Image (spheres, helix red, strand yellow):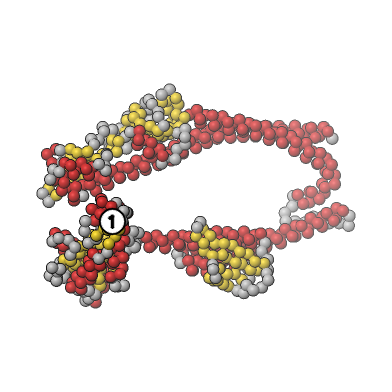
Amino acid sequence: MASFRVKLVLYFLLLSLLPVAAAFWGFSTVAAHGETKRVDERLQAGLRASLAGYQQRIDSAQATATNLAAAKLFKRDLEQNDDIAVRRALQRYPNVEITGPFGLRFGAAPPVLSAKRTASMFSPRGFIGSVTAFVPFDTNLAIRLRKTSGLENDDALVILDGTRIVASSPPVFGFADLRAGASQVASIGGARYRAVSAGSIEEFQPTRIAVISPQHKIDAAASATRMRLLVFMLGVLVLVSIVAYFEGRSIVRRLSGLVAAAHGIARGRLSERVPVRGRDEFAQLGRAFNEMADQLEARLHELEEERARVRTAFTRFADALGATHDPDQLLRVVLDTALEATGATSAEIVDRGVLLQAGDLSGAEDRLEIPLVAGQATFGTLVLVGPSFDEEARLTATSLAAQAVVALENARLHGIVERQALIDNLTGLANRRHSEEALSAELARAERFGTPLSVVFADLDEFKAVNDRYGHPAGDLVLREFADVLHATLREADVAGRWGGEEFLLLLPGTDADGGAQLAERVRAGIEDRTVRGPTGDPISITCSFGVASYPAAETADDLLAAADDALYEAKRAGKNRVEGALPLLRRP
């Protein structure tokens, strides 16, 4: 007996040794490759994030150059050679250089290693200069890009000029000959690094961004993994030996008693049965095996039917969830599907009262309550009532609720995004896109029914001076105050929108030019009578200029906007705080 057990242990060890050795070699190789791949993926992700951050800075430089080139006051100062005003304006832009008339230059000169974005300035008399915004390739840029890259502490971000490292975070010095886009091992300053480099980030410069990680860290991690694998494999061999020993002893003890029943059941399927003869223990064991097979076969059939029903319910449920953004319809789908999938007799969804109900919940049966919560948003509680709920039914209900809250949250976010796409967040008025759509719709309605339509452009006077003197929070307060005046003055059918900055557009359906001028005058008087308090409590006087145009005098949307804009310009030129019309209107004295 002892000899058999020893032989069995030796056989198991011999059979296990080769697979274990092969597994150790394969897993150790995979672990080394996996560690390298993990570092490569991290470096590539960090490089992509760094390039995205760099692009944001380039886009910001371009926006700065474009905005400065379009600033009317700035162009006026530059055209008039007002050096003091130009230099004062450039104090807010440390990385901007201005080239003015006669070759005059203002601001900081861009370093040789920098990305530049230029915008030209024009006045009615022609070209007057250019604005150059630049992003230096220095250590400050490397630090900022690394902060948003997601790199680990041992990783570094470097900026290369050809093969020379010109900036890095943390500091790395030396030269690196890297191929763009490929993961590679490079020697930098006497140390080996795993590196990933981007291509040239400027068209006419060999400047590149790369991310590196110490190679010795990767080697150490792979070595530690191999050691853990070796210990695990030795443990497997010991475990195989122990299992083989006890299994051998068990086989020897029970072989004679179970061989007949084992041959009949071990090689059969659920449709097969063990022959039963007599009334002894073996017959009882055979009958028990047969009864077990019958139960398993019946249970398997029931499970297949139950799974088919649940799959059907889940399919309908998924189709319904993907087909609507209406929370009420989604809640009804959730309620009906939960009833069908869990076998409940009744259900309801409650949230400070009953939202939806199916069946009668008054019976004293098993009760299952599942909150419909997604983050900070709650959509009520799903209450199911039935004779009893097993663990599978509870898991099904929980899974349904998890899918439901995702769809409900998506519907809620869809509503928020839909509203944000049409409303200006600061003033609560229509945004420019909504205003343009409303203008097209109202103009089409006016053409169809032959009714007038007035368009009013409103522009707050000296708004930049308010921002410069009191700060942008005070400017935002002025914009909201003007929006309140519009809400209080306009009719429900009228549309008020923020066109951009301190400029607003009013659409007045069914209103001719005189009516539009009268309404604009009421708005002008209303805002003039209001006083906004600045951060220190100082009163801020607000006035506004208006330009009025009307259909059918102007027939297209572009003509209406252009006529109203011309009238607004005339109001500004005539002294501001007044109403001017594109057609002859009764003006304020």
Q: What amino acid type is highlighted by mark number 1?
A: Asp
Point out residue 76 in the picture as x, y percentages from the top left corner: 15, 48
Q: Is residue 588 visible?
A: yes
> Residue 198 occupies which quadrant of the picture?
top left
With respect to residue 410, does 329 lie above or below? below
How many numbered circles does the render carry?
1
Q: Report the residue at 33% width, 33% height from top.
A: 138
- The quadrant of the picture occupied by the C terminus is bottom left
> Where is mark 1, residue-wise?
538
Left or right side of 272 for 485: left
**SS at circle 1:** loop
Q: Report the residue at 58% width, 59% height from top.
A: 399
Point out residue 435 in the picture as x, y percentages from the top left corner: 28, 64
With respect to residue 477, does 7 lie above or below? above
Point out residue 572 in the picture as x, y percentages from the top left corner: 16, 60
- The quadrant of the picture occupied by the N terminus is top right
Q: Report the residue at 62% width, 33% height from top.
A: 229
Left or right side of 283 for 98: left
Q: Report the residue at 68% width, 59% height from top.
A: 300
